[in-house]
Amino acid sequence: MYCKKRNSNSEQFRSWLTAKELNEALIVCIKQCQKQQFSQEIEDFIKTGKVHKKSVVTSLNPFIDNDGLLRLYVRYILNMWNLGGILRKLGTNEQCVAFSEQEGLVLKEKKCPVHRSNMKILYSVGCKHFGTFVCSKGTCRTKFGGNGRKISRRKGTFFENTKIDLIHVFYLIYAYARGWSHENVILEDPYKELNSKCLSSCTIADWFSYCREVIVIYYLEKKLEFSGKIGGPGKIVQIDESKFGKRKYNKGTTIFMLYNFFIVFCKFCSFTEDFLFVSGRHIEGHWVLGMIEDGSQDLRLEVCPDNIRSAEVLIPLIQKHVQVGTTIHTDCWRAYNCLSDYGYVHKQVNHSDPENPFVGADGIHTQRIEAQWRVVKSFFRTKHFTNMSNFTDLIIEYLWRRYVIKFKKDAFVELVNAIKFVYELK
Ligand SMILES: [Zn+2]
């Protein structure tokens, strides 16, 4: 590391090494050792995605992480957060405060805007939160009275306006990260006997939506997994659109009748078919475009704007994710007909062909993308998916969860990182 540093043209040559640099050096060392001891395993994994059955590490589920290190899945699972760990490490308010300070979720210290000296932290009796920054010097005391100038430590953080205890907040963050249902959260709540009451479904829904909001911002800003395009010449990408959500007439029959009336009205005034189409779609659900490359797990999903699945909408979405020259398999939806005009090799499977509804001539099929729809839809069934307006957020939550599993991350750690990123402390 020293050598690397000396060679680089950095103006500031510091004599000490940062923790990050030491970590990088350690990775280089471990890589060298692994190259000598496990070269066959590493080679096998890169080629086939798994190691040879006879290898000594096979039973420990080895994999290669982002740094290119050979790691053991068993060891990695043991290091992940679990409910026991949450109780042990985040089971008291003091622990939650210490953890939040350490993870950069809340400020450790703050200077008084007038006196420029560190403010004290005051905890009220039985405080279930982070306490308050207080300055009781001169003018601050005379101006504000009591203990002087007060600034809540929660202000501007993820925890602002929290109505429940910190231990519950961290429990809910954990539960969201694990993808638990509301029922599960209530059932597993380790504090329910202590408080002799349980979390309301409303509170859970609120905190889950705060967490989802964080994930959506984090996912989009960090552009997770969206590295480059899929496909390429000689490669096959299956593309399909699917409709999410059902016709919901929550407001009773009045809306339904109004809707029917609206359609008759439109017909009467001879509005175009397309207009009817759109207004009909809006009530029915959301169209999502899915794209997956053969032999890869890299799934791309896009919610169609305004629920339109015309060529004008679909082609730019496809161009955003799929390389020119790719062979694209689709069903017979007419919007795809012009794909070959955009530099793609286009092949269709005709679902209404009674002879062979799933596999077209030359073995063309879209079964992989259709299998993906089943998984995505089962995810939506487990969510309390009643509000159509947060649909795009749920799709992103789904993609984030896929990302966490694919890169073998600890969902709780990832979520805490996301909170830290979104609620950057100033
Ligand atoms: Zn002051």
Image (cartoon, helix red, strand yellow):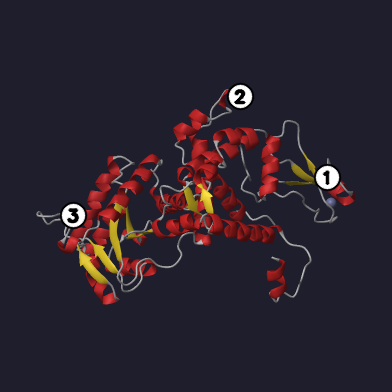
Q: Which amino acid type corresponds to the residue marked 2 in the rendered image?
A: Leu
Badge 1: few (under 14), some or many (20 or more) residues near its Cα, within 10 Å? some
Pointer 1 residue Cβ closer than 8 Å to ligand 1: yes
Nearer-the-camera pick, 184 or 88: 88
x and y, in percent, of residue 335 in the image = 24, 66
Alpha-carbon span between mark 3 and mark 1? 74 Å
Nearer-the-camera pick, 111 or 223: 223
Q: Is residue 67 visible?
A: no
Establish if 227 lies above or below 129. Answer: below
Give the number of the mark in front: 3 or 2: 3
If you read the primary sequence from the N terminus, does the residue marked by circle 2 or circle 1 appear first?
1
Q: In which quarter of the view is residue 318 placed?
A: bottom left
Q: Badge 2 is on which residue?
A: 194
x and y, in percent, of residue 276 in the image = 24, 59
Residue sitting farthest toward the left: 355
Q: In which quarter of the view is residue 365 placed?
A: bottom left
Pointer 2 residue Cβ closer than 8 Å to ligand 1: no
Q: Badge 3 is on which residue?
A: 358
Q: Is residue 403 left or right of residue 161?
A: left
Secondary structure, mark 1, is loop
Residue sitting farthest toward the right: 138
Q: Badge 1 is on which residue?
A: 148
Mark 3 in CB contact with mark 2 (< 8 angstroms):
no
Q: Which amino acid type corresponds to the residue marked 3 in the rendered image?
A: Phe
x and y, in percent, of residue 217 in the image = 52, 56
Nearer-the-camera pick, 408 or 119: 408
Establish if 271 lies above or below 423. Answer: below
Q: Is residue 116 left or right of residue 304?
A: right
The image quadrant where one finds the N terminus is bottom right
Q: Is residue 243 left or right of residue 410?
A: left
Secondary structure, mark 2, is helix
x and y, in percent, of residue 394 in the image = 42, 50
